Amino acid sequence: MSELDDAVLKDSLDRLGSGALTPDEIAEQTQSLVGYHYTVDDYYEVGREEVRKHALAVQDAHPTHWSEAAAQAAGHDGLIAAPTFVSVLGIIAQRKLFEEVVTGYDLWQIMQTDQRLVYHQPMKVGDRLVCDVSLDSFRHVTSPETIDLMVTKNIIWNQHDEPVMTTWTSLAARPGMQVDPEVEDSLDHVMMKVDATGDPGRTVDRKGGRYDIADPVQRPGAYSAIDFDSLTVGQTLPAKRFELTRGNLVNYAGVACDPNPIHFSEHVVAAAGMDGVVAHGMQTMGLGATYVSEFIGDPAAFCEYHVRFTSPVYVPADDSAAVDFTGKIKSLDPATRRGTIALVAKQGERKIFGRAVVVVQFN
């Protein structure tokens, strides 16, 4: 792996020249950046109220996200973040990637298709998180339609240089998509506009080092998770239904700092060829984590959470969307006292996850 610096970016852009880029040129540029990496300039500090806001957004009432006393009783120093809290800093961490590195794609043209989270320890209030970002892989597909498939990788560390989480995010994007001028005008009126933002400066100053070492392999403890010996392979989890409205979507967009208008604009989803406004992939994944946390007893016992998004959750303007979760103990390992839970999430009869599993460290 090589450090991604200004010289690399300038060379990549100079080779393409100026003017609008064709899909093949966009693909060539992006492919050349696979294996490069950078560290986000500013650390992200996990705040007490941010933990609660995110928990509310994914309908997670687990006491470890709300009550310091309850969190301490479960073996934590203080409040811990819900298992998909990484979505809050993920947009920030990858902003440079899509604004300065992987160019040629509009925000609303990018869809998340797969998410893998590997936990090394829970995120907690007071953590100052440092994120290493890389473009892990890229593939340009031209049939039956032109789609670029890419995987980004984040390794997240705390202020003590301890690994917290490693994530892989698979994305599908339409490069150089031409939009009807009338629709483009509508887009201009719904995309978020910001006159100016403040500059936090560089609070993280390091290069190299961690990129040349093996990926972290540390696993979290069981904390107050339920007893391994109480479980059996094939055991089912109680079914649970969550409801989502446009209000839930807008709230989640604000909490996660995700302004993608496919989550609130009829104009944009029409331009994107979608059937309607959709929930965030990480919002539905967060609901799944809430569901599992209620069963296992402690969300900090998540070791891995992997979801393949196969169908979005469509949320109508005049009604709520029901998302139904069921689960089953897929496997149990007596040597490690870990187990794998397989999840099924549906909107009506339509599955929204193609594959969803959670690996848990039980007591």
Image (spheres, rainbow, N blue to C red):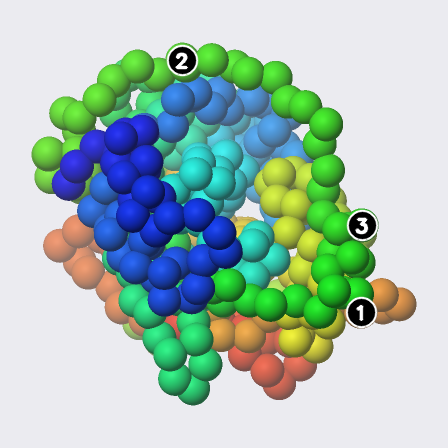
Q: Who's the residue at 43% across and 38% down the image?
A: 100
Amino acid under disc 3: His
* Residue sticking out furthest to the front: 18
- Residue for badge 3: 189
The image shows residue 94 at horizontal and vertical percentages of 44, 40
Q: Are marks 1 and 2 in contact (CB under 8 Å)?
A: no
How far is mark 3 from mark 1, CA to CA?
A: 21 Å
Q: Nearer the viewer, residue 104 or 127?
A: 104
Foreground disc of the pair 1, 2: 2
Badge 2 marks a residue whose secondary structure is: loop
- Disc nearer the start of the sequence (2/3): 3
- Residue for badge 1: 316
Q: Nearer the viewer, residue 134 or 66?
A: 134
How far is mark 1 from mark 2, CA to CA?
A: 42 Å
Vertical arrangement, residue 43 with respect to residue 252, above or below: above
* Residue sticking out furthest to the left: 213
How far is mark 2 from mark 3, CA to CA?
A: 35 Å
- Disc nearer the start of the sequence (3/1): 3
- Residue for badge 2: 203
Q: Quadrant of the N terminus?
A: top left
Amino acid under disc 1: Pro
Amino acid under disc 2: Thr
Badge 3 marks a residue whose secondary structure is: helix
Residue 122 visible in the displayed image: yes
Vertical arrangement, residue 202 with respect to residue 175, above or below: above
